[in-house]
Image (cartoon, grey):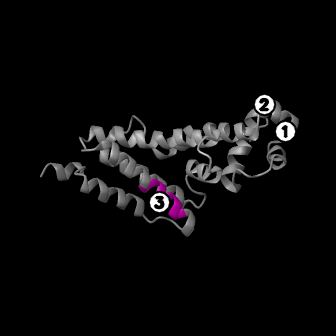
Amino acid sequence: MHTSATPRERLLDAAGELFYRDGVNIGVDALCKAAGVSKKSMYQLFRSKDELIAESLASRGPAYQTLLRPGVEDDRPARERILSVFERQDDMVASGNYLGCPYVSTAVELKNPEHPGSVVARHFKQQLTDFFHRELLKAGAEEPATLAVQLTMIFDGASARSVVRAQPLGGIGAATASALLDAAGVRAAELQLN
């Protein structure tokens, strides 16, 4: 954490880290202590802890998405771009610091679909589904909307499995996604030529 960071930035950073590691039920005192900010300051910056949950999740979202999804400069075929998400997930889990998808973790913990944190979680999960949908459209897949949801479910299932089993995925997410793509006729470029 940079000493030049504002109290707001320190709170968002501390909240993002603590909520991911310890869950959203961590106390305000612990959050403020980790951020080096008083409770009074926290409540001047955020109307409530719920708002802090939502904003900390939103502030970390773009970086998490960048870790998972290939950039626009990646010109591989759609199938490879889709599978790269699962390969990156595999790498994140293998690093030993992965505690599951932060959006799913937050939404499951909150249990309230109207909570601001759940709304943010849903938004970012939709972005992953939208990415899959765009790639499937490029690949000419039949029923790309359904297939995109299925791929998101594979991602979320692999994420949950990695946490429950407390061990690397060993490629199971990518293999499952590959089998789904094969069944849907979204084949590797070299197989399409035959």
| Residue, disc 3 | 158
Q: CA distance from mark 1 to mark 2?
A: 10 Å
- Residue 61 seen: yes
- Judge whether residue 31 is colored magenta: no
Q: Earlier in the sequence, mark 3 or mark 2?
A: 2
Magenta-colored span: 154-162
Q: Is residue 39 left or right of residue 54?
A: right
| Residue, disc 2 | 45
Residue positioned 61% across, 40% down in the render = 114
Q: Position of residue 135 (x, y in %)?
A: 33, 40
Instruction: Label 3: state its secondary structure.
Output: helix
Q: Position of residue 159 (x, y in %)?
A: 51, 58
**90 w.r.t. 38: above or below:** below
Amino acid type shown at disc 1: Val
Q: Earlier in the sequence, mark 1 or mark 2?
A: 1
Residue 29, numbered label:
none
| Residue, disc 1 | 37
Label 1: few (<14), some (14–19) or many (≥20) C-alpha neighbours in 10 Å: some
Q: Position of residue 165 (x, y in %)?
A: 54, 69
Amino acid type shown at disc 2: Leu
Are the two marked residues, 1 and 3, in contact with CB atoms closer than 8 angstroms?
Answer: no
Residue positioned 36% across, 46% down in the render = 148
Q: Is residue 140 left or right of residue 62?
A: left
In the orientation shown, which residue stands out farthest toward the left? Answer: 194
Q: CA distance from mark 1 to mark 3?
A: 37 Å
| Between 193 and 132, the one nearer to me in the picture | 132
Q: Where does the N terminus fall, quadrant-wise?
A: top right
Label 3: few (<14), some (14–19) or many (≥20) C-alpha neighbours in 10 Å: many
**41 w.r.t. 103: above or below:** above
